[in-house]
Image: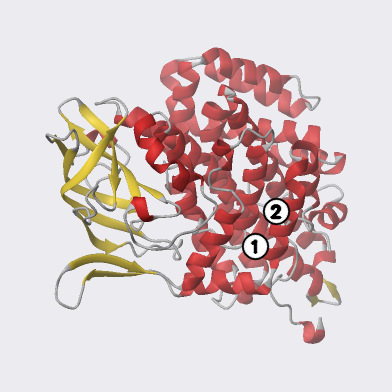
């Protein structure tokens, strides 16, 4: 690189430069390789990176009133936002997992989401919520019949209009309130039944995600308890629903997307699911959104690795490329291992959703959300540091990745919530958990066998001592799963290095242990 100056990595196909992902797709979803290769090329273009930059630098703007004081609650976005949504939806990544029965469709979705998330993560939020709403709505045949085509559409329709006039639909979520947070039983929003069978909702939501969505699934309290409701942006008679946007959240990251605080003033809503069973109804929805959090964080891991590795290959110091220097190689190889293991875990979770495997859908998904999302926070910071001051300025992409990383760890349940959900899943289906551990214990790697046996003893020991170690359980499950997947699917060098570095007792700082065959691992991590 002339003058030893290295620009951001851009202008490369996001799929073909990722040998591990490319090979995994050939093995699990060969039909997805051609369309995702085309999408990877589109995502890699400098123009697409500029779209991401514009959408984040010129975030959404709220207009609550028009020029004469009438309530409009309009949110204006930069055109780049709608272009990104149209790109993603056009690939079928919102609804094809439910609209088709093609084997490997979940792997295709996970890979496409992963590729898109490396470029612009905020646009994954409305897509994730819309996808997760579909299985909930499918259980309401009359309602679903009116929205099916809009949900399954590959078009993006940005107009603000009643559902009947839209070519495609986006669905948001509204669960938490300021006094309750994760404790959804403390919601105070009330739902009063109306003569036509609808309900009038009065109250607030502290986080109302993607407020410009065509409808939201929300929680409100009836006499039977918290209940799930379908809350459209327009009422059936074509009037704007009584949902008042108070303000948009000024978030640390995820700035292209908008979240809001809202008040309901007798808003029209339709019950979804059994009255008083709203939390279980939305917990199912949360399973899908948590999978997307894992995928989104894996995407950030990959994006950070790619920028750091590209810079280290091209930048020279003390007489040679940074990537040739031993300590830099160790840190970069650690990042590469973290990224590949997260990608392989995300694809395994996706397969679990496709085939309805309880161990992977209900137990490993919250464990993976805890671990992968937290690793993304640490690793994007490490990638930023590897670029030095050039990584810490807004002219590059690493600042955006770093600010983006915490949202997946917080959204849909923080680390503690995920850890406790792992314990709840184990308590509900102990045989499933023990069978999973027995499978891990058959690993050819002694450290994995030992960890699986420790976890078994922990789960079958004193129940009173288990809750305090819930994070330890989740971490152990994920590391065992990743080690097994790496041994089954990755190169011998990568699997050996992962086991060697992930099951030691000297802490979890990146780059603290020599990584066997580091140079070879880095050569394989980024092609082209």
Q: Is residue 204 left or right of residue 423?
A: left
Residue 207 on image: x %, y %: 31, 51
Q: Secondary structure at mark 1?
A: helix
Q: Give the quadrant of residue 356.
A: top right
CA distance separating discs 1 and 2:
8 Å
- Up the image or down, 466 lies above or below 479; here it is above
Q: Is residue 208 left or right of residue 304?
A: left
Badge 2 density bin: few <14, some 14–19, many ≥20, Cα 10 Å: many
Q: Which residue is mark 1?
A: 383
Quadrant where the N terminus is found in the figure? bottom right
Render colour scheme:
secondary structure
Q: Secondary structure at mark 2?
A: helix
Q: Along the line of sight, which residue is nearer the eye, 410 or 244?
A: 244
Residue 507 appears in the figure: no
Residue 267 appears in the figure: yes
Q: Is residue 403 left or right of residue 165?
A: right
Q: Which residue is mark 2?
A: 335
């Amino acid at each position: 690189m002339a003058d030893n100056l290295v620009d951001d990595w851009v202008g490369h196909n996001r799929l073909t430069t990722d040998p591990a992902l490319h090979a995994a797709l050939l093995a699990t979803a060969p039909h997805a390789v051609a369309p995702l290769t085309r999408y990877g090329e589109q995502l890699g273009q400098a123009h697409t990176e500029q779209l991401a930059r514009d959408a984040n630098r010129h975030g959404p703007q709220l207009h609550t009133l028009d020029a004469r004081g009438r309530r409009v609650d309009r949110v204006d976005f930069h055109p780049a936002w709608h272009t990104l949504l149209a790109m993603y939806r056009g690939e079928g990544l919102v609804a094809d997992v439910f609209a088709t029965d093609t084997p490997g469709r979940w792997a295709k979705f996970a890979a496409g989401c992963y590729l898109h998330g490396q470029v612009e993560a905020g646009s994954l939020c409305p897509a994730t919520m819309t996808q997760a709403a579909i299985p909930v709505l499918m259980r309401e045949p009359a309602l679903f019949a009116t929205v099916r085509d809009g949900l399954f559409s590959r078009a993006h329709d940005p107009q603000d209009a009643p559902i009947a006039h839209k070519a495609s639909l986006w669905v948001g979520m509204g669960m938490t309130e300021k006094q309750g947070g994760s404790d959804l039983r403390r919601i105070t929003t009330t739902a009063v039944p109306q003569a036509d069978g609808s309900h009038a909702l009065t109250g607030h939501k502290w986080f109302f995600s993607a407020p410009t969505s065509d409808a939201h699934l929300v929680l409100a309290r009836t006499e039977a308890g918290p209940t799930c409701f379908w809350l459209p942006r327009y009422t059936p008679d074509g009037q704007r629903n009584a949902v008042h946007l108070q303000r948009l959240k000024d978030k640390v990251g995820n700035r292209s997307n908008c979240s809001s605080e809202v008040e309901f003033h007798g808003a029209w809503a339709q019950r979804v699911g059994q009255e008083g069973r709203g939390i279980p109804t939305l917990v199912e929805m949360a399973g899908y959104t948590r999978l997307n959090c894992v995928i989104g964080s894996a995407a950030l891991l990959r994006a950070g690795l790619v920028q750091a590795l590209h810079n280290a290959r091209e930048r020279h110091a003390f007489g040679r490329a940074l990537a040739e220097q031993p300590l830099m190689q160790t840190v970069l190889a650690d990042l590469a291992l973290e990224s590949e293991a997260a990608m392989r875990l995300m694809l395994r979770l996706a397969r679990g959703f496709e085939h309805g495997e309880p161990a992977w859908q209900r137990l490993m998904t919250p464990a993976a959300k805890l671990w992968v999302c937290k690793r993304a926070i640490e690793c994007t910071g490490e990638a930023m540091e590897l670029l030095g001051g050039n990584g810490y300025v807004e002219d590059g992409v690493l600042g955006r990745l770093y600010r983006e990383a915490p949202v997946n760890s917080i959204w849909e349940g923080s680390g503690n919530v995920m850890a406790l959900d792992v314990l709840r899943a184990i308590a509900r289906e102990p045989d499933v958990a023990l069978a999973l551990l027995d499978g891990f214990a058959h690993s050819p790697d002694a450290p994995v066998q030992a960890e699986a046996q420790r976890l078994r003893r922990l789960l079958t020991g004193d129940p009173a001592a288990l809750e305090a170690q819930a994070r330890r359980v989740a971490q152990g499950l994920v590391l065992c799963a990743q080690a097994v997947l790496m041994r089954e699917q990755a190169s011998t060098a990568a699997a050996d290095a992962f086991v060697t570095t992930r099951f030691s007792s000297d802490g979890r700082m990146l780059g603290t242990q020599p990584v066997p065959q580091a140079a070879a691992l880095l050569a394989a991590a980024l092609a082209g």
